[in-house]
Amino acid sequence: MSHAILHATGLAKSYGSTTALSNLDLAVTQGESLAIMGASGSGKTTLLHVLAGITKPDSGHVLFAASGGPLEVAALGETERSRLRREEFGFVFQSGLLIPELTALENVALALMLTGVSRAVAEREGTSWLAQLGLAGMEDRRIGQLSGGQAQRVAIARALVTGASVIFADEPTGALDSRTGAEVMDALLASTVGQGRTLIVVTHDATVAARCSRTVHMRDGVLVDAEIAA
Amino acid sequence: MILRIAWMLARPSATGVATVALPLVAFATVTALLLTVIGGAQTFFSWSDGDAIIYQASAVIALVLLVVPLTSLGAAASRLSARRRDDRLATLRLLGASPATVAAITVLESVAVALAGAVVGVGVYLAAAPLIGLIPFRGEALGAGVLLPPLAVLAVLGGVALLAAASAVLGLRRVIISPLGVRLRQDTPRPHWIRVVVAIAVIVATNVVMGIIGALEVLVILNVLAVGFGGTLLVLGLIGPWVLRMVARRQAKRAATPERLLAARSILESPKAAWAQVGGVAMTSFMAVFAGSAVGLLEALGEDGENPFLYGDIRTGVIITVVASFLMVACSVGVNQAASILDRADLYSSLARLGMPVATMESARRRAVMSPLRITSIGSAVVAAVVVFPLTGAAILFAPLSLVMIALVLAAGIALVWFGLLATRPVLERAAILP
């Protein structure tokens, strides 16, 4: 039976006089793909940041069902939240934000090395993930030598290589044309929910949201409705 | 119109005070050091006896040695200035401002920051003058002779402003300010191995010449040494980026931790840029070993000549030049690093989101600067020791303390640069800060 891997209750966050989140509740089920939609300034990126432990809410709770037992994300200190993001979560950003001077393989392996894994093992795992994402033979290419879609696949491999159970993606196809965007979404879905992981996507793009199993809409820091894909 | 826009853009930005403070401190340091060295030289040029020419020549060499770190510092400060305003300058381009207008605003701002720093530098120089006046040359304190006339001080201020303007123009050639933002041109050709062949040939030739000149008169020796010195400096400039690249390549292959891998790759990205940042110390390290061992040896052998203070004085001059050179490199590193962090603010922020500790980013950055610096300063010292091997060999035997002192001064210089790097940590912390 499915259960909530992330459970947020009563989340509130303000930046000065601007309310980004207001008494928001949300449960994310393990293995689902959740799209968060909304206009600019609706609070969707803040919600993603709070769920991922990047930002601390002003009030409210985020309970994460970690492999070692439940964790109250919002109550953790910065060091513990950094460790949580390194070891349990994966991230894919709009423009990849890969390290340009590293090769594709080094970008992926670096994420694993940060958790204390040796370089040899990290590169073996990285090679395997790059191959799964259709990038075999491109390990030694620098980021500038890859197309936008290929770079985004490297970013996906980097997010997955640590064995993360939840992947957060912020406009993962926002910088790509529609065809490449669709291919990247195929790769993202297959490598996350296709393997029992949870995917949370912030997007403006209705076609991206339509690929997810559930979509929630935000306005002025609150969830206004929810749709479950047929 | 340009003045009005520049004034509007001069308001504080979100990147914090460090990006203004760093170039300001850098130019203050440059001005204070320049005035101090020129002040000292002024004292030497008031002498007219037989030994005066040696002091005057040494002062000119010291000034020349300081020009390289000085210009690289000016360029770094201008680059930071462009980075600090990149979003606003890009907006101006979007609004239709021509590249020439944007360049003029950047140059104007660089000059304004340089002048403000230079004025602070004059204050530092005046405050430090009584202490500098205590430094003894020829057995007597320099005294009030280090104080320059107001016109000379104004000339230095003008010179620093001109340098800032020239560096800003040159710096901007490497930066493209497009309507969609500012970015660095990615033209980083690899240093070719042929540089090493040329370098070895020059080292061997210089070594042979040095072996022949032993019995000549002091002034002739000085002239030949100057040629050898110049030749070897040329070699260092040729070989430096290539050596940095080879060492970094090996480090990248063997890197077992994220910070080591990042540091090595960062150097490999542009060995020439890594060299440009720290290359200024190559010359001073080279000169420190060169002059230090000669002076130490002559002193140990009791070759006092007519002036019993000459060798001690040269040693004092060497130490002052080395410290001044490292101070400038420290400022240059600080300013360059601040610019580099601003260039990559998005990346640092994303790495923090991925869970990379700021300490890891800081460590990678430190290694990327300190490793080339160590290679450059120690490597140049070793090249100097090889070029004048009979001299350094004898110095090891007869004047080991002299060499120990050189090593200590170089170590202190490296520590200075480390502090310069440390000063930019707040910029990194601000860039990596999470929302």
Image (spheres, rainbow, N blue to C red):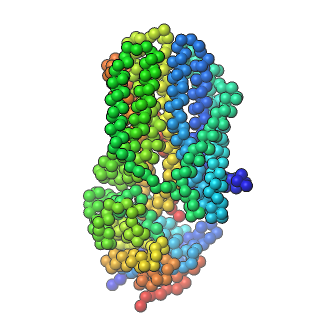
Residue at point 33%, 51% (across, down): B252
The number of numbered discs placed on residues in the rendered structure image is: 0
Q: Is residue B155 above or below residue A112?
A: above
Q: Is residue B316 above or below residue A161?
A: above
Tell me if I can see residue A100 in this picture: yes
Quarter of the rendering containing residue B122: top right
| Residue situated in front as seen by the camera: B432 or B230 | B230
Q: Report the residue that reaches farthest toward the top.
A: B306
Q: Position of residue B382 (x, y in %)?
A: 35, 31
- Quadrant where the N terminus of chain B lies? bottom right
Quarter of the rendering containing residue B295: top left
Q: Is residue B169 above or below residue B30?
A: below
Q: Position of residue A3 (x, y in %)?
A: 37, 81
Q: Position of residue A191 (x, y in %)?
A: 34, 75
Residue at point 56%, 11% (across, down): B49
Q: Position of residue A210 (x, y in %)?
A: 45, 84
* In-image side of B358 versus B97 (left or right): left
Residue at point 50%, 61% (across, down): B346
Residue at point 49%, 86% (across, down): A226
| Residue situated in front as seen by the camera: A133 or B238 | B238
Q: Report the residue that reaches farthest toward the bottom.
A: A230
Q: Is residue B170 above or below residue B1?
A: above
Tell me if I can see residue B88 in this picture: no
